[in-house]
Amino acid sequence: MNIEYLKGPKGDNQYYEIDFFRKGGMGEIYTAKDSNSTSQKAIKIVPIENNDEYKLLVSEFEVASSLKHKNIVSTEYFSEFDNKNVKYIYCVMPFNSNGSLRDYLLSKNEIIDLQISINLMIDLANGLETAHVKVVHRDLKPENILLDQNGNLQICDFGLAKLIDAKTRTKSFKGFGTLPYMAPECWMLDSNTRAMDIYSLGIIFYEILTLKQPFTGKTEKEFRDKHLYEPLPNISNFRVDLPVRLIEMISKMTNKRPQERYSSMTEIIQILEKLTENLEVKSESKIDSLLHKANLKISDTQKKDLERQKEKEKIDSELKFLEYSTNSLFDKFSNRVNELNESLERTKIQISKNSSQMTISFMGKSFTISFYTSSNIQQRLKDHKQASLQYQKRQYGFVMQAPQSTHLERDNVVLIGQMVLNRNSAPIENLGYNLLLRKANQEDLYGEWWVVWFEDSGLSGERPLNKHYAISVPEFYEEYEFGRMRAMHIRNMHMNTLEAEGIDQMTEKILE
């Protein structure tokens, strides 16, 4: 975008020689000269998509302009302009040629001196303490921290900060955060609180001390799981000169539970200043040794708590997934029945259902869809592995190889059910289909419904040949393995994805 001049507090053409510098988290950064000053300026320009966004940005720039501190990049002026029928809002800040904290960290080939590290932390803590009077930054990261001409750190991008207690915005709007620094509650889109910034700052402190990010990942999900469930890697593994009090402070700042972090930056500043006072006379005393042991025990307890929390969320997520999937299946049948009922004048097809069962009936005939307990599958797989191990021990005296996966496991079957005709006088038991919910892989969020049906083969002996029926658990497990192996057996198994034809075939049975 070519811009010749921008308005300033001293005139309509105050800023000139406006050149693109780099792309920012939202909008773009330009450099400019100021006709009323010899200093160079940085101008952040953000396009406005709607009026609500405009009001939010104006409100936040007003707050940013009011933040005055040596460790905060000052917002000197903000205004707006139109270009090619698009509205833009911009804010003017001093241009800093010394780069960001990220540039500084990348330039280091060895660990930063402890006193220098603590001085950097104090700069950031002081700046954030002032900001927290009015706003939550919500996107703290080394890229948003600049070095001024005197070597002081300054927090920037407060023009995109969030008013305290405002609800976190969606990922599509500014301020969702940056993956390596996002607090657990940020992933859950909770309201903005100071605790979010304290968590992010703790991650940055860790990085200043070690030159490493504690949590890395290739995908958003990997980052989410690490922030939610993984304890902070032991910082002592990367350097041995850290006071126990500093390690404990960072651990508390990055606690998964917001209420367990510090309530304000003031407490953190007091700790850092005390560390600075004691640094020159620091010695490894008996109390330090005891504190190290206590800290290790606390970390171990927190790790176990996180493992329990992760398991609970896994169970909760699985239950929600199964509920969604069964409701989706029921909707397929309900929608089809509703289509038919639109053309039926005298008697309608009836539907009755609860959370785990649906019955569709018409003039004395019906079929029912029901499901077996999902935990039964996991128990079956566990029993299979245990039986395989015990067999090998009995047969050979030791385990020769790991148990082979069952077809049930390889197919990622997570739920088994059946839809069968309810006809008391019918000679064929369980006439109908088995239902399987299968996932393509572990990352598959929704899975796919399949139908399975059995027919007696010529090997069934004297018994009459029955066609197209379902089998109940636990017999189904064994029959499924035979069917997937296509082994010669008294039953033949067929399977296919659940299509509209399968729904129509069952519906047709009760209409005959």
Image: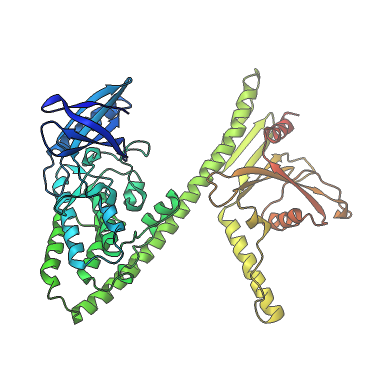
Please indicate, yes or no, whether residue 258 appears anywhere in the rendered image: no
10 versus 138 height, above or below: above
**Quadrant where the N terminus lies?**
top left
Q: Locate residue 488: give its quadrant.
A: bottom right
Q: Position of residue 438 (x, y in %)?
A: 61, 48
Q: Position of residue 462 (x, y in %)?
A: 89, 54
Q: Locate residue 191: give its quadrant.
A: top left
Q: Position of residue 158 (x, y in %)?
A: 21, 41
**Quadrant where the C terminus lies?**
top right
Task: Give the image's coloring scheme.
Answer: rainbow
Residue under the point 26% across and 75% down? 292
Please indicate, yes or no, whether residue 364 appears anywhere in the rendered image: yes
In-image side of 22 versus 424 (left or right): left
Q: Position of residue 148 (x, y in %)?
A: 17, 49
Between 224 and 113, the one nearer to me in the picture: 113
Q: Locate residue 105: give its quadrant.
A: bottom left
Between 137 and 155, the one nearer to me in the picture: 155
In-image side of 281 versus 60 (left or right): left
Residue under the point 20% across and 32% down? 59
Between 371 and 359, the one nearer to me in the picture: 371
468 versus 80 height, above or below: below
Between 339 and 485, the one nearer to me in the picture: 485
In-image side of 75 versus 46 (left or right): left
In-image side of 181 versus 425 (left or right): left
Q: How many marks?
A: 0
